[in-house]
């Protein structure tokens, strides 16, 4: 896809994957709608995009609040009339056992990671269908395929995102509108700045640069595939899990359970 003069809306655009994705799209001439909760951080990103001479719009929005999303969409349609690519990237995790997490902790992850995506899809999909063009990119995680100790509620939100995307993809057949999920392994971003991760090793040796994921999001914006894993070799792990669950699940479970137990010491 030629992204020049296309309008791309990115949630969670104030830092990490969202910020780098905005830069990569802007390099190719796309107009960018930056969506996040922090005005100050969004303004910094917007300033970085000025050198690319593209149109930008800042929208202060908590995607977990559907009224916020509706208000945000009004500002978007007022300036751009429509969007071509929706990148649902906003998300976070709270690291702890289900026993220790509060109901509110679990609900907050589902509201942002899953329902935030739902609210944006429901808001912007109708105009894509009317135009018979557009693409939705949902940023998930390999945690969409592996239920892991310590991040069970985060995994649930990403499982839900992947399942919803698969069902919607079937519904969108022959409409001109596409949907693709990008599922990376650990990425070196502010995601792990949440206090619940303070006793964990910051990043694994295999963790990704956010630019690697941003490049995958650009590919996904013009892809017919349901899911793109990053790196692509991680697809083997997903295949092994689904093919030999009785072998893989105990190994993964024990590894992550040991890490969770160590964080309690």
Image (cartoon, rainbow, N blue to C red):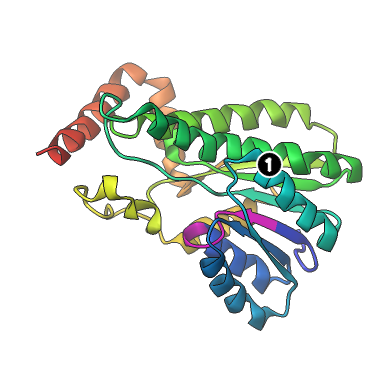
The question of residue 15 being in magenta is answered with yes
Instruction: Give the answer, above or below, for where 196 lies relative to 48.
Output: above
Label 1 CA crowd tier, 10 Å (few <14, some 14–19, many 20+): few
Q: Quadrant of residue 28?
A: bottom right
In the current view of this chain or complex, which residue is farthest to the top? 246
Residue 94 image offset from top left, x and y in percent: 35, 40
| Residue 221 horizontal side relative to residue 244, left or right | right
The image quadrant that residue 65 belongs to is top right
Residue sitting at 44 percent across and 45 percent down? 92
Does residue 225 show up?
no
* Residue closest to the eye, 242 or 190: 190
The image shows residue 120 at horizontal and vertical percentages of 68, 42
Residue under the point 73% across and 72% down: 29
From the top left corner, tell me how far across and down residue 213 is, in percent: 50, 56
Question: Where residue 203 appears, x then y in whole percent?
Answer: 28, 54
| On screen, residue 225 above or below 220 | above
- The local secondary structure at tag 1 comes to helix
The residue that disc 1 covers is 67
Residue drawn at x 42%, y 42% is 234
**Quadrant in which the C terminus is drawn:** top left
Q: Is residue 176 left or right of residue 31?
A: right
Q: Where is the N terminus found, in terms of image quarters?
A: bottom right
Q: Would residue 99 be counted in the magenta stretch?
A: no
The reply to whether residue 134 is visible in this rendering is yes
Badge count: 1
- Write the start and end of the magenta stretch as one range: 9-17
The front one of 189 and 33 is 33
Residue 168 position (above or below residue 129): above
- As drawn, the residue found furthest toward the left would be 265
Q: 147 above or below 122?
A: above
């Amino acid at each position: 896809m030629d992204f020049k003069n296309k309008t791309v809306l990115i949630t969670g655009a104030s830092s990490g994957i969202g910020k780098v994705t905005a830069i990569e799209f802007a390099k190719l001439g796309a107009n960018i709608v930056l969506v996040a909760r922090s005005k100050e951080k969004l303004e910094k990103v917007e300033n970085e995009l000025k050198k690319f001479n593209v149109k930008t719009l800042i929208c202060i929005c908590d995607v977990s609040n559907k009224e916020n999303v509706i208000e945000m969409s009004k500002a978007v349609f007022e300036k751009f009339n429509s969007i071509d690519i929706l990148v649902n990237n906003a998300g976070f995790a709270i690291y702890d056992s289900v026993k220790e997490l509060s109901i509110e902790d679990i609900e907050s992850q589902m509201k942002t990671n899953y329902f935030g995506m739902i609210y944006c899809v429901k808001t912007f999909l109708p105009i894509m269908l009317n135009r018979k063009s557009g693409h939705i990119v949902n940023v998930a995680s390999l945690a969409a395929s592996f239920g892991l100790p310590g991040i069970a509620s985060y995994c649930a939100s990403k499982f839900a995102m992947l399942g919803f995307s698969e069902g919607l993809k079937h519904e969108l057949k022959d409409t001109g509108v596409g949907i693709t999920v990008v599922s990376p392994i650990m990425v070196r971003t502010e995601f792990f700045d949440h206090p619940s991760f303070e006793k964990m090793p910051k990043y694994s040796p295999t963790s990704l640069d956010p630019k690697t994921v941003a490049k995958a999001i650009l590919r996904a914006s013009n892809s017919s595939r349901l899911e793109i894993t990053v790196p692509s070799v991680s697809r083997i792990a997903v295949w092994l899990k689904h093919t030999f669950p009785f072998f893989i699940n105990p190994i993964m479970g024990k590894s992550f359970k040991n890490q969770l137990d160590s964080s309690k010491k």
